[in-house]
Image (spheres, rainbow, N blue to C red):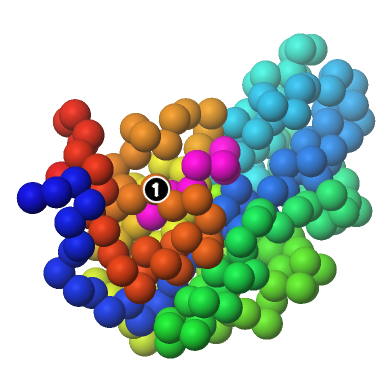
Amino acid sequence: MTSEAPLAAISFQAALLDLDGTLLDTIPDLAAAANAMLIELGAVALPEADIATYVGKGTENLVRRCLSDARVALPIDEASVARALAIFGRHYHAVNGRAARLYPGVVEGLAALREQGLKLAVVTNKPTEFTLPLLAHMGLAHWFDAVVCGDTCERKKPDPQPLLHACALLDCPPQRALAVGDSVNDALAARAAGITVLAVPYGYNEGRDIHELDIDGIVFGIDDAAAWAANPRRPRKRAGGHP
Ligand SMILES: O=C(O)COP(=O)(O)O
Ligand SMILES: [Mg+2]
């Protein structure tokens, strides 16, 4: 068998797309809000590259990681975290989308997936209050048949629940869905849901190499993911990895 043998033809019915690090580079706005929060709490700003590694498990995790990493000791009891979250939210609402950028190939890829007859959903760990205005601001909202956010279900990715919820909303069996993400949270959630999953190499993945992920392939953008969906290929073999 060659390393790029075609898979037994799956005809995909839906694409479930991660947001931060997959469709949009949101780090400048997230870092600006996180640093404004830290400064308001009497700490100093953190490097944007460090903050980028805290993105992927939702806003509360980002805020907690910033508080514990602050160069000035900050309280991390529940009341202090809740206060910090409210401060972060105020700042993020003020800048959400300001410096965010679509990655190359996103619009072309969404159009190509649609042309192949797939329904499209966003499945993000970002809370609804930030996700919906951001999709509207970036001109992306009209592409999606469903949007599942970090607070839509009881549990977030890496739990499979949000991806399975998106499948239910789109009336798509998990075996006929294709997830595309940038992080271990997308990979684990999709595997647990029995959903084929691809990863893009330009996202955040909590600072780790995406070659460590158990996924069905690496694609270089949503346009490449659409090409993969039309002609699925087996991933190259990796030592100890998924076959
Ligand atoms: O809010 C986050 O931590 C990341 O969101 P994502 O699931 O769109 O990558
Ligand atoms: Mg992501």
Horizontal side, residue 161 vs residue 63: left or right:
left
Q: Residue at x 20, y 39 (%)?
A: 237
- Camera-nearest residue between 146 and 13: 13
Q: Give coordinates of residue 125: x percent, y percent.
A: 56, 54
The vertical placement of 169 against 31, above or below, is below
Q: Which residue is mark 1?
A: 218
Near-viewer residue (57 or 187): 187
Q: Position of residue 208 (x, y in %)?
A: 47, 29
The kind of secondary structure the magenta stretch mainly shows is: loop
As for residue 15 lying within the magenta part, the answer is no
**Figure quadrant of residue 145:** bottom right
Q: Is residue 79 left or right of residue 108?
A: right
Does 195 sit above or below residue 46? below
**From the viewer's perspective, is 130 left or right of 60?**
right
Q: Position of residue 85 (x, y in %)?
A: 74, 43
Q: Quadrant of residue 228?
A: bottom left
Vertical side of 203 occupied by 137: above or below: below
Residue at the far left: name it: 1
Residue 165 in the image: state x and y as whole percent: 41, 73
Which residue is farthest front? Answer: 2
Instruction: Indicate whether 9 appears above or below 106.
Output: below
Q: Residues within 10 Å of mark 1 (few under 14, many from 20)?
A: many
Mark 1 residue element: strand
Q: Residue at x 64, y 70 (%)?
A: 107
| Quarter of the rendering occupied by the C terminus | top left
- Locate residue 232 relative to residue 37 in the image: left or right: left
Q: Residue visible at 28% across and 64% down?
A: 232
The one nearer the camera, 53 or 44, is 53
Give the magenta range.
198-204
Q: Is residue 201 magenta?
A: yes
Q: Is residue 188 visible?
A: yes
Q: Amino acid at mark 1?
A: Ile
